[in-house]
Image (cartoon, grey):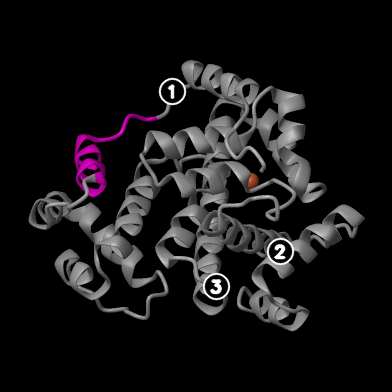
Amino acid sequence: MRELHPPEQELRAAYTFIQNSPFPSIPDVVNKIAEEFSRPEPDLSRLIGLINSDIALAGLVLKSINSAGYGYENIESVQQAVVLLGLNKVKNLVMASYVRHYLPTRSLFAKRIWEDSTEVANLAVRIAAELFDVPLDEAYIAGLMLDCGAIFVAERMLEKYDAVYQMRYERPISINRIEDYRIGVNHSAIGYLFARHWRLPERVCLAIYLHHGTSCEKIDDAPLRSLLAVVKLADYLVMKVHTGIELDHSMEQIQHIARLKGELMIDSNELAHLEQMLN
Ligand SMILES: [Fe+2]
């Protein structure tokens, strides 16, 4: 079985990076919400009270829930969302709203990443809803967070990283190795640490770490394999459509897409249909 977690050397590089450029600290209210969610039986009224304690953030939570592809568009309160969807389905959407709000979005680079990530998250939800047994909220938050590590690296390295990051268009599968070689750390490992820092579910953390890996098939954990295939396909399609760059048709890339299609049991027509959703 494939080792799913980052190897020691990669983790050490990521920790060193974080020591020099620490993540933003988690606001107290988010810590309390994450803590409550992690209990075997969360106290619902306490949770709702915590979420509603910041009206602006409660609004963001509702916005996420209403646009997350569950088929509801007029949910007006966190209470209503919990009743209609259940706590489990709301949990990751709540955390996604907070992450989105507290992560840096000032630079042009960060804005670009967030725009693409929002598209990836929305498409991942649609793929999960149509094709696969992946919880929609998990697909959403994993899609949204896939490249969050890149924002932290970019904040520190500025133009130097921008140039490296563009290389993902040319060789998307091996971008992490290019980053390791050029800047000594990669955005998947940084994203993994950040997701753990925010106490996101382990499966989401691993999907973030593994999203540039070449293959899902060696992963024994079926829910992780499914989640990973969904977000990798969404990531690939958004990159292809948004950049307008015709990706190279190297054997490596053809095999990569064939594996994803096999994993999701979709054919070329369905792949084209998903691509059209972005146009
Ligand atoms: Fe990435």
Which residue is found at the position 70% from the left and 37% from the top?
176
| Sooner in the amino-acid sequence: mark 2 or mark 1 | 1
Which residue type carries mark 3? Phe
Q: Give the dominant element type of the magenta stretch: helix, strand or loop.
A: helix
| Residue count near mark 1 (Cα–Cα under 10 Å), binned few <14, some 14–19, many ≥20 | few
Vertical comparison of 64 with 117: above or below: below
Q: Which residue is mark 1?
A: 22
Q: Is residue 178 left or right of residue 136?
A: right
Local SS, label 3: loop
Vertical comparison of 13 with 41: above or below: above
Residue range corresponding to the magenta coloring:
24-38
Name the mark on residue 132: 3
Local SS, label 1: loop
Q: Are marks 2 and 1 in contact (CB under 8 Å)?
A: no
Is residue 217 among what the camera can see?
yes
| Sooner in the amino-acid sequence: mark 1 or mark 3 | 1
Which residue type carries mark 2? Leu
In the rendered image, which quarter contains the N terminus?
top right
* Front tag of 2 and 1: 2
Q: Which residue is mark 2?
A: 260
Please give the count of numbered marks on the rendered protein: 3
